[in-house]
Amino acid sequence: MREPGDGIPGEELVAAGVEALGRGERGVEALLVAVGAPRLRTLGIPVPDAGRLPRRPELALYRAVGQRHPDDAHSRYNALIRRLVSFERELERRRFSGTTRSDTGQ
């Protein structure tokens, strides 16, 4: 049986972030999932409880990206957010339409 996010671009980031949050980590993937936690939970992604999430995940994510890539933190942060939003929108589309892109021939 396929999981809700199977085959959606960005799935690997979300899956890695959920696993990392479950271990109590605060890396880029975990913080990205923390940013999207409310919507991801609504869409059926099992994001670990709020006690493990940073209070201001957007700021924590930006700082983590900046530590890895100080010269282009802003563009990399924005790319991650776009990828998350794209993942969420496609998952939402699949959930409410009951189809995948492969079902529709796309």
Image (cartoon, helix red, strand yellow):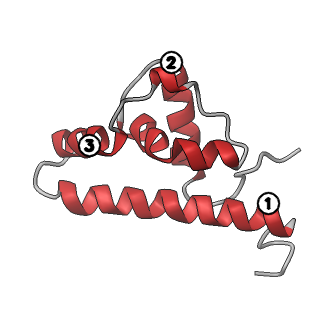
- Can residue 30 be seen? yes
Q: Residue flagged by tag 1: what amino acid is it? A: Arg
Mark 3 → mark 2, Cα distance in angstroms: 21 Å
| Residue that carries the numbered disc 2 in the rendered image | 23
Question: Mark 3 or mark 2, which has the lower sequence index?
Answer: 2
Mark 1 → mark 2, Cα distance in angstroms: 28 Å
Which corner quadrant of the image does residue 99 belong to?
bottom right
- Which mark, residue 59? 3
Callout 2 secondary element: loop
| Crowdedness near tag 1: few (<14), some (14–19) or many (≥20) residues, C-alpha within 10 Å | some
Q: Position of residue 66 (x, y in %)?
A: 18, 45
Q: Is residue 12 above or below residue 76?
A: above
Answer with left or right where residue 74 lies relative to residue 52.
left
- Which mark, residue 20? none
Tell me which residue sits at (32%, 37%) in the image: 56
- Which mark, residue 95? 1
Answer with left or right where residue 96 lies relative to residue 84.
right
